[in-house]
Image (cartoon, grey):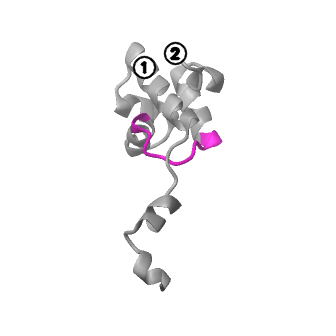
Amino acid sequence: MPKAALRGSVADKKEKKSPSEVVLLFGKNMRILRKKIPFTQEKLAEEAGISVDSIKRYEKGKVPDLSLDMAIKIAKALGTSIDAMISKP
């Protein structure tokens, strides 16, 4: 079967990366800490120097990988460490 015929099949879906437990924990903790401060998503994005869309994607676990650079910016803006951001609550 030619590769083109596999589009939309299970083979295509397996190629997409799902978020890891670390990414999901990071997003969950980010949201909890952001609300405790309290920061809006817009304010956190401004403080971290990243887009609001990035904040939303991380909080929802809609990113396949956690960028170290992004994690540092967000943790710093929230006044915490990356370790705290990926720890189970």
Between circles 2 and 1, the one closer to the viewer is 2
- Report if residue 68 lies within the magenta region: yes
Q: Position of residue 47 (x, y in %)?
A: 48, 30
Q: Position of residue 66 (x, y in %)?
A: 58, 42
Is disc 2 placed on a helix, strand or loop? loop
Instruction: State the CA–CA distance, disc 2 to disc 1.
Output: 10 Å
For the record, the magenta segment spans: 59-69
Q: Is residue 28 left or right of residue 73?
A: left
Q: Looking at the picture, does residue 72 appear above or below residue 62? A: above
Q: Position of residue 76 (x, y in %)?
A: 58, 26
Q: Looking at the picture, does residue 20 appear above or below residue 25? A: below
Task: Residue lying at the far bottom in this picture: please name it.
Answer: 2
> Which residue is depicted at the point 38% across and 39% down?
56
- Report if residue 13 lies within the magenta region: no
Whether the residues at callouts 2 and 1 have beta carbons within 8 Å, the answer is: yes
Q: Mark 2 = which residue? A: 89
**Image-quadrant location for residue 43:** top left
Q: Where is residue 30 in the image (x, y as percent from the top left)?
A: 47, 26
Q: Residues within 10 Å of mark 1 (few under 14, many from 20)?
A: some
Q: Earlier in the sequence, mark 2 or mark 1?
A: 1
Question: In this orientation, which residue lies closer to the viewer: 64 or 48?
Answer: 64
